[in-house]
Structures are given as C-alpha cells and as structure tokens.
Amino acid sequence: MSWAWFHRFGSPPYFYRVAGILVPWFAWPAAILIFVGLTWGLVIAPPDRLQSDAYRIIFVHVPNSWLSLMSYSAMAIAAAVGLIWRIKVGHAVAAAIAPAGATFTAVSLLTGMLWGQPMWGTYWAWDPRIVFELIMLFFFLGYIALRNAIDDVSRADRSSAVLAIVGAVNVPIVHYSVIWWNSLHQAPSVLRVNGPSMPLAMLAPLLVSFLGFTCYFFAVMLVRARAEVLRRERGGDWIREAVAGST
Amino acid sequence: MSEFLHMSGYAFYVFTAYAIGIASLLLNVWWARRNLTLAKESARRRLAMRDVAS
Amino acid sequence: MTLRRSATQAAGAVMRRDLLLAFRRPGDWLQPLAFFLIVTLLFPLALDPELGRLRQLAPAALWVALMLASMLALDFLFREDAQDGTLEQFALSGQPFAALLLAKTATHWILTGLPLAMVAPLAAVSLGAPASSIPMVLVTLLLGSVSLSLIGAIGAGLTLGVRRGGALLSLLVLPLAIPTLVFGARATQLAIMGESAEGPLYLLAALVVLGLTLAPLAAAAAVRISLE
C-alpha cells in the first residue's frame, strides 16, 4: 500500500488547499442530515413504551456522547502522528479538534442531566459513566489550558501531544464503565455483539443524526485545522496566494 | 400540535436539550470560521512585515 | 558511547544527591507534611467533632488531604534541576533518561509521600478510625502516594517552566489520579469500617504497577520536550 497520500497530507499547502475544498462536502451533508435526523426524532418517531416523549433527548444526547469519545480518540491519534512522525499537520489537526471535542462532551453531560431528571428523578448522579465523561471534559480542558500556557508553538504542540496520549486511556473506560460497574446507565444498546436492541423506528433517526454529527465534526475540524496550519507556517510563498484577497 | 408542544409533560426537558444541542452546533461553526479569519489576517500581517523588512 | 557507570549506579547516584540536597532545604518537604496535617484538622473543626460521625468522613478527608499535599509537593520535583541545568545533563548523559527520572521521583516520594503515609494513621485516629484499621490505612495510603508521585511526575514534566504552572499541574494531574482516588479511598473506607479491603486494594496495587512501568516513560518524554 502506498503511503504517499499520507505524506502528501502532511504537506501544509496541500492540506490547506484540500481541506478548503472538502469543507462544503462535509458541511452541507451535515446540515441536512442533522436537520432530518433531529426533526425525525423529535416529531415523527413513535413515543417510547416506558418513557413516552422524554426519550427523544437521545437524538441529541447520544450523538454528542459518541462524538466526544471519537473526538478524543482522533485528537490523540493526530497528536501521536505529530509527535512520532514530526508532521506539523498532525499537531494542527489535534489542536483543531479540542474545542469541538470539549463542546460535544459538555453538551453530552448537560443533555444527559436533562434526561436524567425525568428518567431517574435526579439531575445528577455519581454514576461511573457520567463521572468518566466528566473526567473526559477535564482532559479536554486541561489539554486546551496546557496549549494556551506555553508560548512556543512547537513546545506547546509536543507537550500537549504527550498529555493527549496519556489521557487516551480514559476512552475505553467510559465505554466499558457501564459493563464493569453496576450503573444507572443502561448497558450498550447499539454497539453490542448481538447487534442493536433498539427498534428500527428509533434507531434510524438516531443513526441519521449521528452521521450528520460526524460530518459536522469533520467540517468544523477542517476549518480550524486550516487556521492552525496557517499559524504554524513561518515562510513559504504559498501563504501569499492562499490569503491574498480572500476574507 | 399542542400535544407535540406538550411532549407528554416533558416539554421543558426535551426542548431545552434540543436548544442546547443546536446552540452548540451553531456556536462551534461561528467560532471555527472566526478562528480562520483571524489566522488569515495575522498571516497577511506577518507577510506585510516581511515585505517591509526585506 | 561506553558509559563508566551502569544505569543502576547512575540512578543510585541521583538518589543520593537528591537526598543530600533535600536535607539542606527541609522546608521543601516539611511543608507538604504540615499542610496535610492542617487539612485533616480542618474537617473536625468544620463539622461536629463527634468521632462516630467523623469516622464516616475519615477516608475522604485523608485522601483529599493526600492529593492536595501531593500537588503542593510536586512543585519542587524538577524545578531546581531544570533551572540550574542538571536535568539537561541527565538527558545528555547517555544513561536511560526514564531511569534517572524514576530515581528522582523515588527520592521525592521518600521525602514527601512516605512521611505523609506514615503520619496518616495519626490523622486517621484523630478522625475516629479504630486502631485495628491502622495497618491497612497505612498500606492504602502508601500505595496511593506512590501512584500520585508517579502520575505527578508526568504533570510536572509537562508544566516545567510554564508560568503559573502550579495550578495547571493540578488541573492536569487530578483527572489522571481519579482512579487511584476511587480505589484507594474505597479500600481505606472498608478498612476503617472493619471489613475486608482486598478488592480495591488489589486494583490500587495494579494501578501502582501500571504507573511504575509507564509513567517514567511519559515523564521522560514530557521533560525532554520541556527542556528544548
């Protein structure tokens, strides 16, 4: 398998240009899929047997939760690529993911609280999955804080990369916490060995919504990554053409 | 329609959750684009400084 | 390059040096100890000093005080040696950097974590713990302090020379230390209640082993980056 494409993406001008082209290809599907998924889940999907209409929160809560885990993993991988192969674009991508990842995690926790009150009778519970998701938020915030505290961009990149990799151990813990501990959270109902246990009428809008959020993640990440790549360039005439005349 | 808005009594929870979710999506879009605009501006300024210096 | 000393000898030399230097500056390692005692003292003063009620709080008070005192102590782990260039010499010496850092962390623990753990039984008794629970309280806090020192070394390496690094250090280390806190506090609690603490104790020991094997590598990577 040729690794040429891998190294090509590592070239800042190539990445900048290709990312710019790709953004609308992710942004528009994201907007459409999220709109369709959320409307479907909010309006069309049937009420749940036990929770009637309160369960509709899952169409916002679950994609954000999945994306918080996926973002952290992607951030850790990008940071590792930057650290091990010394590819600056890797660091740029990692920095680009952090704010969105933190937001996904925060929204996951907040919407979870809003679901917890009708479902369990309490806004908050010291439940393993919630705790580890909260820890995930601290990891994101710590990552951002470390980056901001170090003035030298190169050192900030590499130190935060070490932090991201060390914190990656939390990701499987969040997923498996509901199996390892007795938890208020239900056991996984989608990513299971025997296949999903959710009825199709509810699973379908969830998957559409999730797909939309994933496209959204890529779109936002690519926009930020372009900014990060620009910041890391010292010389190069390609910048001249890239920023000339455009707003 | 009023049944929809009522959400069998859970209207506050459901609509607030959706509002937070959508607000965060819009916020991140605005933030990311602003970030790129600022980065382009500072790149332009750096280039201008180099041109003056050379 | 051929080295005149083995890695073990080098590590031993680092430990001897650090211990010698530390005894010339007792403030560095006495302060966290005093801080630990003061924090545990705050709990009975803030609450009703009835021992029966305090006993329920004792594990939490001990562990929170341990974690806070450890954050305080981590300040001096690498600071002096980074400032006077010794750490750079270690990195360039040709000896395995992770081993030298592990030696520094071990000495730091002997000066801070170990005294904290030894004093903890006193604090525990003052918080209503029965005398029969003392051995287990000692063991859980010994293990916990080792784990905190190892994880703390990673944070200290990452925040070397960063302004207001102390607060940032706590923000980075405390989330990583939460599994240690959860299992350790649970073990201490079971011990104080008079029940068997085996389960959480083994998990805590597992975390210590994990820390011993991986933390020095991460700390070495972090320090190398910070020194450039």
Image: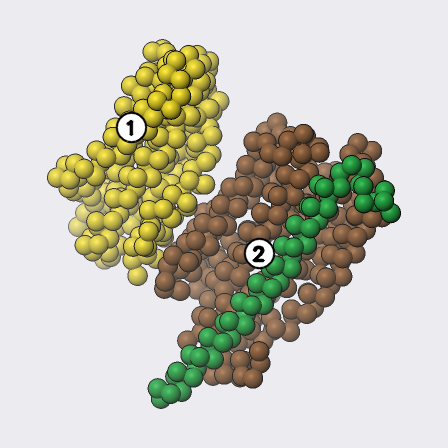
Name the colour assigned to chain A in the rendering.
Answer: brown
Q: Up-down: is C188 above or below A176?
A: above
Instruction: Determine crowd level at label 1: few under 14, some 14-19, many 20+ residues with C-alpha closer than 10 A.
Output: few
Structural distance between the alpha carbons of marks 1 and 2: 41 Å
Name the colour assigned to chain B in the rendering.
Answer: green
Determine contact: label 1, label 2, CB under 8 Å: no
Task: Identify the image quadrant of the N terminus of chain A.
Answer: bottom right
Tell me which residue sits at (77%, 53%) in the image. A37
Task: Identify the image quadrant of the C terminus of chain A.
Answer: bottom right
Helix, strand or loop status at disc 1? helix
The chain holding disc 2 is A
Q: Is residue A107 visible?
A: yes
Q: Which mark is residue A100?
A: 2
Whole-percent x and y of residue C132?
36, 11
Amino acid type at mark 2: Ala
The chain displayed yellow equals C
Q: Which residue in the protein does label 1 denote?
A: C38
Q: Residue furthest left?
A: C24
